[in-house]
Image: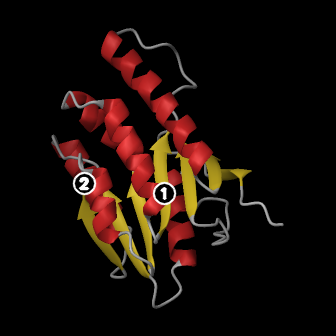
């Protein structure tokens, strides 16, 4: 179990960053569940695609971690549109994860800048509370190929823009949560 306590006082929006297997998804789910006092509904927006057996198993494990309170919406590419359909007041929406969404966009040869702008505009207009999860990929070595470097750079720029817009930012490493940003109180 990760070493953190869920605190629903993250404002309207929370961005959770961390490396692979850092505990970021578990932390984000705990934060969402703590914020979803009934009759608030929980919505999980999944961006993963199961192209192989290992990914299929990983998705199944994530689904098993969520109980019957959760509604799942698949959005491997059309994330802004999916958010508009579930982003009404009375919902806590968890998007897991932005790096998979970004990978899907790159592989589909989508216009990344246009898609990121659409995502940011959508987040600004949501009535729901939203939690966005993403992998921090800029702490490792420089990738050895152009596509991987393009992905790393796009992820870094996406993370900067998301972090600037949301109310709260948490970093999760080894199951430990570091709060980097919280709403200011007057």
Total residue callouts: 2
| Figure quadrant of the N terminus | bottom right
Q: How is the image coloured?
A: secondary structure
Q: Position of residue 72 (x, y in %)?
A: 28, 68
Q: Nearer the viewer, residue 48 or 161?
A: 161
Residue 65: give x, y in percent of width and height.
Answer: 38, 67
- In this picture, is 157 found above or below 141? below
Q: Mark 1: few, some, or many residues within 10 Å (few <14, many ≥20)? A: few
The answer to whether residue 168 shows anywhere in this view is yes
Residue marked by disc 1: 124
Q: Secondary structure at mark 2?
A: loop
Disc ID at residue 75: 2
> Image point 54% across, 26% down: which residue?
138
For the question of whether residue 173 can be seen, the reply is no
Find residue 95 and name its label: none
Q: Is residue 119 left or right of residue 131?
A: left
- First in residue order: circle 1 vs circle 2: 2
- Measuring 46% from the left and 84% from the top, which residue is drawn there? 40
Identity of the residue drawn at 32% across and 39% down: 115
Closer to the camera in the image, 67 or 134 = 134
Residue visible at 57% across and 58% down in the picture = 14
Q: Secondary structure at mark 1?
A: helix
Q: Is residue 124 above or below residue 34?
A: above
Mark 2 neighbour density, 10 Å: few (under 14) some (14–19) many (20 or more): some
The reply to whether the C-beta atoms of the residues labelled 1 and 2 are less than 8 Å apart is no
Report which quarter residue 67 is drawn in.
bottom left
Residue 54, given in percent of the width and then of the height, sits at 23, 43
Which quarter of the figure is the C terminus placed in? bottom right
73 to 91, vertically: above or below: above
Q: Residue furthest right?
A: 186
**68 and 158: which is toward the camera:** 158
**101 left or right of 54 in image:** right
């Amino acid at each position: 179990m990760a070493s953190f306590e869920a605190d629903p006082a993250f404002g309207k929006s929370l961005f959770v960053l961390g490396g692979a297997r850092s505990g970021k998804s578990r932390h984000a789910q705990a934060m969402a569940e703590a914020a979803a006092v009934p009759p608030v509904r929980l919505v999980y927006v999944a961006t993963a695609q199961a192209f192989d057996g290992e990914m299929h198993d990983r998705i199944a494990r994530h689904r098993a971690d969520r109980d019957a309170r959760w509604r799942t919406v698949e959005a491997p590419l059309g994330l802004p549109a999916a958010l508009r359909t579930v982003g009404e007041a009375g919902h806590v929406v968890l998007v897991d994860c932005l790096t998979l969404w970004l990978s899907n966009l790159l592989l589909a040869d989508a216009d990344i800048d246009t898609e990121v702008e659409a995502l940011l505009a959508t987040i600004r207009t949501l009535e729901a509370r939203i939690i966005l999860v993403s992998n921090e990929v800029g702490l490792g070595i420089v990738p050895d190929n152009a596509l991987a470097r393009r992905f790393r750079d796009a992820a870094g720029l996406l993370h900067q823009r998301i972090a600037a817009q949301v109310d709260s930012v948490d970093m999760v490493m080894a199951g430990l949560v570091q709060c980097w940003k919280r709403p200011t109180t007057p």
